[in-house]
Image (tube, rainbow, N blue to C red):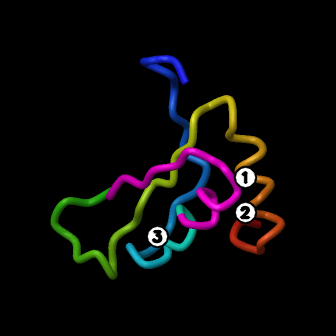
């Protein structure tokens, strides 16, 4: 992946646990993925997390989430 590649948000996960599960699924399927906490003053259980992948992988990553009933 080239330096400065664009990351795209493909999902908003509610809770750190949910975000970790999604990142783990994406990684098992070979996707480069990361999560970013949305709010700085909210607990990890109540927070939202942006699930991001490189822009070139966004469509395929979203399809994986759909197939696993994580994205409607």
The disc at residue 46 is: none
Give the side of residue 55 with respect to residue 66, left or right.
left
21 relative position to 59: left or right: left
Q: Residue at x 51, y 34 (%)?
A: 7
Instruction: Please give the name of the residue rendered at 76% of the width and 42% of the height, measured from the top-left corner.
Output: 59
Q: Are marks 1 and 3 in contact (CB under 8 Å)?
A: no
> Marks 1 and 2, how far apart in space?
5 Å
Q: Position of residue 16 (x, y in %)?
A: 38, 73
Marking on residue 20: 3
Q: Earlier in the sequence, mark 3 or mark 2?
A: 3
Looking at the figure, which quarter contains the N terminus?
Answer: top right
Q: Residue at x 49, y 76 (%)?
A: 18
Image: magenta residue range: 24-37
- 1 or 3: mark nearer the eye: 3
Q: Are marks 3 and 2 in contact (CB under 8 Å)?
A: no
Mark identifier at residue 62: 1
Q: Secondary structure at mark 2?
A: helix
Which residue is disc 2 drawn over? 65
Q: Position of residue 34 (x, y in %)?
A: 45, 50
- Pointer 1 and pointer 2: residues touching (CB < 8 Å)? yes
Q: Residue at x 33, y 71 (%)?
A: 47
Q: Tag 3, which secondary structure?
A: helix
């Amino acid at each position: 992946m080239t330096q400065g590649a664009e990351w795209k948000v493909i999902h908003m996960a509610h809770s750190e646990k949910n975000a970790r599960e999604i990142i783990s699924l994406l990684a098992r399927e070979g996707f480069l993925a990361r999560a970013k906490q949305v709010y700085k003053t909210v607990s990890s259980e109540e927070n939202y997390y942006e699930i991001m992948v490189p822009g070139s992988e966004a469509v395929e990553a979203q399809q994986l989430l759909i197939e696993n009933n994580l994205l409607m």
